[in-house]
Amino acid sequence: MAPKMKYRVSISLWLVENGHQTGLYLTGVCTATCVIPMARERSCSLFVDFIMTMKRDDSLQSISIILNGKICSYWSTVMKNFLKGKRLWGYVSRTVVKPKNTAKNYVTEMDNWESNNAKILIWIHNSVGQSISTQSVKFETVKEVWDHFQKLYTKSNFAKWYQLEIDIRALQQKNMSILEFYVAMNSICNELTFMELAGLKTSTIEVFLTVDGVKQGSVVYSGDGQMNMLGIIQAQKTAELLLDAKVNTIVSGTMIASVETANAISRVQEAADCLGADCVPRYVEMNQTRGLDVENIFNQSKKDEVTTELWNQSGKAWKYLLDELNKGSDSEKVLVAVGNPAVHIAMMGHCLKLSKERMGSFHLDSGSISIVDFPDGPTGVGIIQCINYTAHLGRWSIPITRSTVDDEEF
């Protein structure tokens, strides 16, 4: 008879999703009685008496909402409630600070802080898309990751907010049932609600880089010409879009197209009470600077000198806009800069600390809007929220079908 021996065996069961181990589900211990076979025997028997203590480990479990850049307001609200439920929201709000090496129980406190910080980082990592996750690996603390997401996806999400309002106006029942139509409408309304609750409609300090409308003639960088009918419509559409932003200052170049676009924006802003966008009229400060005029550079400079002159002049124009933002002590300030697309491209290069050779990486259409946000004030880093936004132009955006001859003759 083969001898019997008893063994105490540890058992771990893991959750597996799509072939990948995602988390520890339970652990336990069992006592096994095993018949040790003799050399002539080909099999053995295993009798297991389970004495198991189950313990659930949720260290890798988080919310089921996945952040993909489109529902950040909803994701941040759910994640905030989740962390509060775990009593760990203080790592984001900074009520729980990193221990100093002068603390009495520094080693223990530091170990606990690093453990919780790493746990939250894993939760966030597992609840965002892969493209977003790769952006967060360079940060060491939860606060840094959270602030990064806030700057990218929630601060000054003006374009997203405007697009939701367009969607809600365009939504039609058609072949949908009443329930399906209600769900679709309610989904858009919920996104708008989350954005308003998070204070996303306008941020602290913003700059709207607005390209003036199409001028008479088909050349974008033409001289001091008036806008044609297409340019006038584009300027009016831009003014309507900016009505939802309480503009404090409008800075334009001295060229006719820039001045006309700036005046259209100003007229709509000052009529905010009549249009139902505000309860009182708005006062908008109007300024002009030749730094936004670059037509002469293209008309007079040699081809190899154009890039250098444009870059230098746009640098001065960008500094002028930052100085305008620094004026006064308003906690919220919205500045609109109207000018040629070339100078806006160059100013975005200065904002991003790029070299002049990278200006060719951007493209702006007539009537487009680009948004730069300064969450830490004008002395902080500018974050470009969107580039070449033209959804407000509708059918009047560029390119559109036009004659091969000059549009004025057409």
Image (tube, helix red, strand yellow):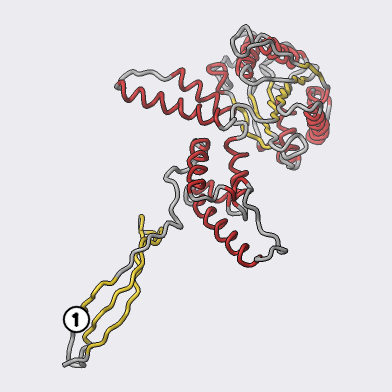
Q: Amino acid at mark 1?
A: Ser
Q: Which image quarter is the C terminus in?
A: top right
Q: Nearer the viewer, residue 180 or 317?
A: 180
Q: Which residue: 64% across, 25% down?
A: 369
> In the rendered image, is residue 303 in sight?
no
Report the side of 284 relative to 89 (left or right): right
Residue 115 image position (x, y, % from top left): 55, 61
Residue 358 at what x, y percent from top left?
71, 40
Residues 34 and 138: in front is 34
> Residue pushed farthest front?
104
* Relative to 135, residue 247 above or below: above
Give the image location of residue 289, x and y in percent.
82, 21
* Residue 379 visible to the viewer: yes
For the N terminus, the image quarter is bottom left
Residue in the picture at 57% in, 22% down: 399
Which residue is identified by label 1? Answer: 45
Query: For residue 149, which quarter of the picture?
Result: top right
Sort mark 1 into few (<14), some (14-19) or many (20+) by Cα contacts within 10 Å.
Answer: few
Give the residue displayed 58% in from the left and 50% down from the top.
136
Give the structural element (helix, strand or loop) at label 1.
Answer: loop
Q: Is residue 389 above or below residue 384?
A: above
